[in-house]
Amino acid sequence: MDFPRTAVVTGSDSGIGRAVAVALAAAGVNVGITYHTDRDGAKNTARVVRDNGADAYVRHLDLTDLPNSSAVIDELAADLGGVDVLVNCSGTGTAVPVMEMDFATWREVCRSTWTALSCARSAPSGT
């Protein structure tokens, strides 16, 4: 492999994730796109990726649900023929300082991050 040919970008329905997905597509990388709540945003990202000549596959991803999160990455890997790059741009957060955050909110933020790391560990290798 001379350079990556496939990537999954979590949280690529908007913001930094969208910009990363589009930049990868412009470089000739086929992209798996995930979203949590903004399906229209993910579809729009996929359109721009395809406009750049790359393949795009869209899936819903809830990083607070580890078994299903890993399955989504596996599905995208199957669509793409493997995953050369996994970019985690998904996130959840709050404007509340961490020392003032209630436990339930803190746990939700951490669980999202831990699940993303687990997905990275289990992502099938690329082509």
Image (cartoon, grey):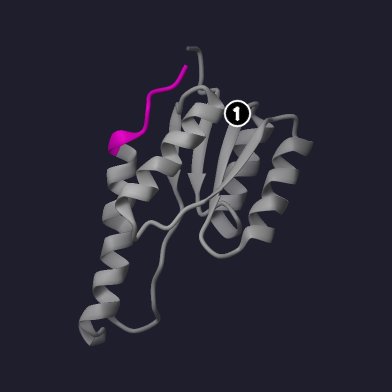
Residue at 55% in and 27% down: 80
Residue at horizontal 61 percent and vertical 63 percent from the top: 38
**Residue at position x 36%, y 43% in the image:** 70
Query: Observer-nearest residue: 69 or 114?
Result: 69
Relative horizontal placement of residue 34, taking residue 74 as reference (left or right): right
Q: Which residue is mark 1?
A: 29
**Measured along the vertical axis of the image, is residue 80 above or below residue 49?**
above
> Element at badge 1?
loop
Task: Bin the neighbour count of mark 1 within 10 Å (Cα to Cα): few under 14, some 14-19, many 20 and up.
Answer: many
Instruction: Give residue 121's position: percent from left, percent from top.
Output: 28, 36
Image location (x, y in percent) of residue 123: 36, 33
What is the span of residues highlighted in magenta in the rendered image?
121-127
Which of the two residues, 78 or 96, is positioned nearer the viewer here?
78
Provide residue 95's location: percent of width, then percent of height: 40, 81
The answer to whether residue 98 is visible is: no
Membership of 49 in magenta stretch: no
Above or below — where is 97 with respect to 42? below
Q: Residue furthest right?
A: 51
84 or 59, nearer to the observer: 59
Q: Is residue 122 magenta?
A: yes
The quadrant in which residue 119 appears is top left
Question: Horizontal placement of 62 versus 49: left or right?
Answer: left
Q: Is residue 64 above or below residue 5?
A: below
Q: What's the residue type where badge 1 is placed?
A: Val
- Please say if 105 is above or below 16: below
x, y (%) of residue 117?
29, 47
Answer whether residue 27 is visible to the viewer in this image: yes
Furthest-top residue in view? 1
